[in-house]
Image (spheres, rainbow, N blue to C red):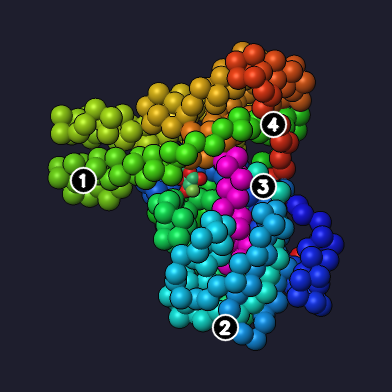
Amino acid sequence: MVANEILHTAFSESFGGHGQLYTAPGRVNLIGEHTDYNLGFVLPGAINKGISVAIRLNGKNTYRVQSLDFKEEVTFAADGQKLPVAWANYILGVVMEFHIRCFAVPGFDAVFAGDVPVGGGMSSSAALESAFAFAINDLCQFGISRRELAEIGQAAEHKYAGVRCGIMDQFASLHGERDKLIRLDCRSLDYELVPFRLTGYQVVLLDTRVKHSLASSEYNTRRAECEAGVKSLKAIYPEVQSLRDADLPMLEAVRSQLQPATFTRCQYVIEENARVLNAITQLKTGDIAAFGQEMFASHEGLSKKYRVSCAELDLLVDIARKCGVTGARMMGGGFGGCTINVVAESALAAFLQEAERSFNAAFGRAPLVYGVKISDGARRV
Ligand code: GAF
C-alpha cells in the first residue's frame, strides 16, 4: 500500500492542510472467472495492494483530483460529461452514481496513488472506484452499505469505462478480510468468508505484462454470447434466468439453436460454476491438491472454451504444471495480465527460476512476480 506520508505531503502541497486518508485494495480470484455476470459463484480475496486517497470537502460544486502516479490533475463537475482523462472517468462515474441515488456529493479536493499494477488483472479500476465510493460515503455520512457501494462502482465502470463487468471486483475490494476468501453468490450477493491461510504454501502472481487492446470489447462480446445462450435456454426452460440455472444436459438440448462458439462459451460457464463449488468444499476439507486441480481445469476452460487466454498466459500455466505447482490459472478478464499460482514453498524457487528462463526464451523478457497476502477491504486509515 502507498505510504500515508506521501499522500499527506502531496495533499498539503496542492491544497494546503490535511485530507482524510482512505484505502481500497485490488483483488485476486482463486477460481470462478467470468461467472459473476452470469450470476454464478466466485472466490476472490482482497490483497495487500491498493489505491489510497487523501480527500477533503472543498465547499464548492467541483471536484479537483490529482493522480500522483499519472502526474495529472483534473477538475470536473457532476454534469455527467465524460472526461478526456481515462482515470478521471472512474471517479466521475462514482460521483454520478451517488447523484443518481439521490445522494448529492459536495465538491472535494483529493490526491490518490496506488500500487496495483494497471492492466495486471488485479483490478486497479475496482480499487479506484471503491476507494472513492468508500471515502465519499464516509466523509458525507451517507450511510450506504458496502454492498451498494460495490454496485455504485460496478455501474460507474459500465457507464464511464464501457465495460459491462460483473460485481466481483468491487465486492471483493469492499468486503475483503485478512486471510479470508469470499465465497460470493453473484445473484443474491450473499457471501461467506472462507478461511484461507495455507501453511507451507504461497500465492504468487506472475505478470505477463501483456495488455491487449481488445480486452474490453472481447469481454463485452463474451457477455453477449452468454446472454444469447440464456435466451435459447429460456425458450425451453422458462425458469432459466442466467447460466447459473442451467446444467450441461439442458445446454445440450438447445445446442442446435446456438452458434458453436456460443455453445462452448456457455459450456465453460456452467462447468466453471461447478468447479467453484467443488473447490470451496476441497478448501474447507484441506484437500489443497484437489483445489489446485480445479484451478488448472479452470485455466483449460478459459483458454480452450471461453477463449480469453493468450500465448503468454498459457505458457506460464504450462510451466507451473511442469514444475509441480499445486494450482495455476489465468486470472481476471483475460487477454493478458497475471496468472495466479498456489505454490508449495518447497517448489517456489525452482518454479520462479524456470518461469523466468522459459518465458524469456519465448518472449524475450521475464514475467514480473508478485507475492500477495489476502488482506482487509476498503477502510479509513
Ligand atoms: C473482470 C471483471 F471486472 C469482473 O467482473 C469479472 O467478470 C472478471 O473480469 C472475470 O471473471 O475483472
Q: Nearer the viewer, mark 1 or mark 3?
A: 3
Which secondary structure lies at badge 1? helix
Mark 1 vs 3, N-terminal side: 3
- With respect to residue 138, does 253 lie above or below? above
Mark 2 vs 3, N-terminal side: 2
Find disc 2 in the rendering and name its residue.
61
Q: Is mark 4 within 8 Å of ligand 1?
A: no
Magenta stretch contains residue 124: yes
Q: Position of residue 326 (x, y in %)?
A: 63, 23
Find disc 4 in the rendering and name its residue.
368
Which class describes the residues within 10 Å of circle 3: few (<14), some (14-19), or many (20+)? many
User: Does residue 153 show up?
Assistant: no
**What is the distance, in whole Å, between disc 2 and disc 3 at their CAs?**
30 Å
Q: Nearer the viewer, mark 1 or mark 2?
A: 2
Find disc 1 in the rendering and name its residue.
231
Which secondary structure lies at badge 2? loop
Q: Is mark 1 within 8 Å of ligand 1?
A: no
Type of the residue with mark 1: Lys
- In the image, taking residue 34 as reference, residue 134 lies left or right, namely right
Q: Nearer the viewer, mark 2 or mark 3?
A: 2
**What is the distance, in whole Å, between disc 4 and disc 2 at their CAs?**
42 Å
Which class describes the residues within 10 Å of circle 1: few (<14), some (14-19), or many (20+)? some
In the depicted view, which residue is nearer to us: 200 or 21? 21
Mark 1 vs 2, N-terminal side: 2
User: Does residue 222 show up?
Assistant: yes
- In the image, taking residue 201 as reference, residue 100 lies left or right, namely left
Please state the extent of the stretch shown in magenta in the rendering. 118-133
Q: Is mark 2 within 8 Å of ligand 1?
A: no
